Image (cartoon, coloured by chain):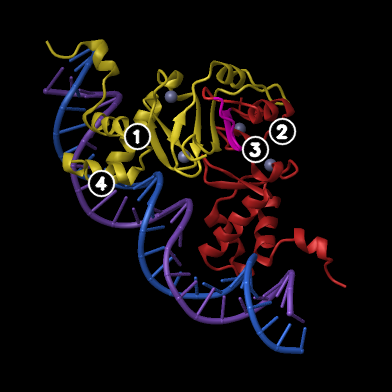
Chain colours: A red, B yellow, C blue, D purple
Amino acid sequence: MGISKIDKMHSLSKNQQIIFDLIDKSPEPLKAYTILFNVQKKGIKAPPQVYRALDKLVEMGKIHKIESRNAFIACHNSSCQVAKATAFSICEICEKVTEISSAGLSKYLANFKDKDGMKYSKYNLEFFGLCKKCR
Amino acid sequence: MGISKIDKMHSLSKNQQIIFDLIDKSPEPLKAYTILFNVQKKGIKAPPQVYRALDKLVEMGKIHKIESRNAFIACHNSSCQVAKATAFSICEICEKVTEISSAGLSKYLANFKDKDGMKYSKYNLEFFGLCKKCR
DNA sequence: CTTATAAATGTTATATTATTACATAGTGTT
DNA sequence: AACACTATGTAATAATATAACATTTATAAG
Ligand SMILES: [Zn+2]
Ligand SMILES: [Zn+2]
Ligand SMILES: [Zn+2]
Ligand SMILES: [Zn+2]
């Protein structure tokens, strides 16, 4: 019994699972050292273990890094075509971060060409403003 | 003679000018400690002096921070409405960064509303791909 | 089941990026 | 002069991230 082949292919390693669970349950983006502190009881003791798991999870599109905050949130948008196209709204007062899922926006950006006619394989967009509660 | 009132209002302080000049001359984004190293001969000796100048220059829209690279480039686009609306293309091989100035893009993003009809006061967009040279 | 390979982990140390805190100096205004 | 405000200088430290190397675990082939 146990885990089937195909499940295994998509499953996370032990550290990855621990760290993903923590991020996924969090209502707010988590920073690497906050994560480290919170998983030390589970045996993850050093920064490289955290950063390695984070790197893999980002690659897989399971989480995203909010670059302007150095923090990580779980993807709630079908893993965003494996992390190639991400957009977020960030409240400048309470720091609430929401992943934006807009067909129009992603279509517009995926097809955007610059002056030289160049198209890009990946983008990250961060909007800033005040959330409902903070207005 | 000297500096008129209005010129003074828009002029940079000594440290700000030194650091802006360095960034403005650079063909590539500069990191804070690279800047520090390069201005030590001019008497700027410690990180806070660099970070303070960078903060002000970003506020003024004279430079932008490339969040995914922790690096700074000079604005070549009328100071981007004082730093409220920025877009860049980043080459994932040579790390060349170019500020994108597209009326269509900035109009689209400035008017973008999310599901709740919320508009944002600010955004930063980073596109990734391969530049002409690296393709 | 062995062997080979790749992926993940554990651990120590260190590099890089950024801020706090506090003292001092300049600038413009009244 | 007195005040407020901005900028600067300096030392120490905090926060974020990676290098390097040893070991273990998982996957795939033979
Ligand atoms: Zn996502
Ligand atoms: Zn808010
Ligand atoms: Zn600009
Ligand atoms: Zn390139």
Q: CA distance from mark 2 to mark 3?
A: 10 Å
Q: For the residues carrying marks 2 and 3, which lies nearer the camera in this image?
A: 3
Q: Estimate the x, y position of residue A84 in percent, counting from the top left.
A: 64, 41
Does residue B69 appear to the left or right of B36 in the view shown?
A: right
Q: Going 26% across and 11% down the picture, which residue do you hit?
A: B6
Distance from mark 4 CB to nearest ligand 4 atom below 8 Å = no
Identify the residue at horizontal 50%, vertical 33% (top origin). Answer: B89
Disc 3 to disc 4, how far (Cα)?
Answer: 36 Å
Residue closest to the eye, A90 or C24: A90
Q: Residue beneath label 2, please? A: A101
| Mark 2 CB near ligand 1 (8 Å cut) | yes
Element at badge 1? loop
Query: Which residues fall within the magenta stretch?
Result: A117-129
Using the numbered discs, state the Cα–Cα distance from disc 1 to disc 2 in whole angstroms. 35 Å
Label 3 vs label 4, nearer the camera: 3
Q: Where residue A91 appears, x then y in whole percent?
A: 58, 32
Three-letter code for the amino acid on which mark 3 is drawn: Ala
Residue type pointed to by label 1: Pro
Please report contact status of discs 2 and 3: CB closer than 8 Å, yes or no.
no
Query: Label 1 is found on which chain of the structure?
Result: B
Mark 3 burial class by Cα count in 10 Å: few <14, some 14-19, many 20+: some
Q: Does label 2 or label 3 sit earlier along the sequence?
A: 3
> Quick one: D9 or A135, which is closer to the camera?
D9
Residue A119 part of the magenta segment: yes
- Residue at numbered disc 4: B37
Most foreground residue, A92 or A47 = A47
Q: Are marks 1 and 2 in contact (CB under 8 Å)?
A: no
Q: Is the Cβ of the residue at disc 3 closer than 8 Å to that at disc 4?
A: no
User: Which chain is mark 3 on?
Assistant: A
Mark sitting on residue B27: 1
